Image (spheres, rainbow, N blue to C red):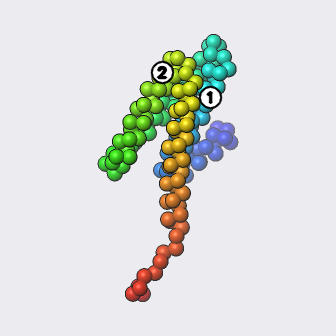
Amino acid sequence: MTYVNSYLQSKVMGADSLELIIMLYDKAIVSLEIAKDCIIKDINDPDMVKKKAIELGRATDILYYLNDILDRQRGGEIAEKLSVIYSILISDLVRANLFNDIESISKCIEILNNIKSAWEDIKRQTKENQNEPKRAFAGAV
């Protein structure tokens, strides 16, 4: 195992659920960037076609997973809206793979970056709330 793999494994093993979700978004975005680059470089090269398909498949798998782990009971309307977004993105990525549509991939990257930013805000707020000093209230002894 390389040092990079060891580092990544320890990072994942030590992450909380919000960090893991953010890591999944990061990986999906990186995969989409790689797929887009493959189309731009040379879509007639069989190696590029294969790499594009693998990376789009990886991003699609991540979206399916994110959809599967949604807590629809506690997440309510937000979870349902995320599910719809994930479904649309998956359809767009299938279409992008078939037609080498860079614009669709770019839009998916933008949407995922926006959602990832929202998760990062939640993580930041959670951390700030945990670090707030506990306030004493009148009558507490």
Residue 16 is at least partly visible in this image: no
The residue singled out by tag 2 in the image is 95
Q: Residue at x 33, y 48 (%)?
A: 76
- Residue 67, position as x, y percentages in the image: 40, 38
- Residue 90, position as x, y percentages in the image: 45, 29
- Residue 116, position as x, y percentages in the image: 52, 44
Disc nearest the viewer among 2 and 1: 2
Determine whether, in the image, residue 60 is placed left or right of residue 47: left
Residue 66 sits in which quadrant? top left
Tell me the amino acid under the disc marked 2.
Answer: Arg
The residue singled out by tag 1 in the image is 34
Q: Residue at x 59, y 48 (%)?
A: 10
Residue 124 is at least partly visible in this image: yes
Q: Residue at x 61, y 31 (%)?
A: 33
Badge 1: how crowded within 10 Å, few (<14), some, or many (20+)?
some
Above or below, 43 against 23 in this view is above
Give the secondary structure at mark 2: helix
| Nearer to me, 118 or 67 | 118
Tell me the amino acid under the disc marked 1.
Answer: Ile
Q: Residue at x 46, y 81 (%)?
A: 136
Determine whether, in the image, residue 46 is placed left or right of residue 68: right
Q: Quadrant of the C terminus?
A: bottom left
| Labels 2 and 1: the sequence-earlier one | 1
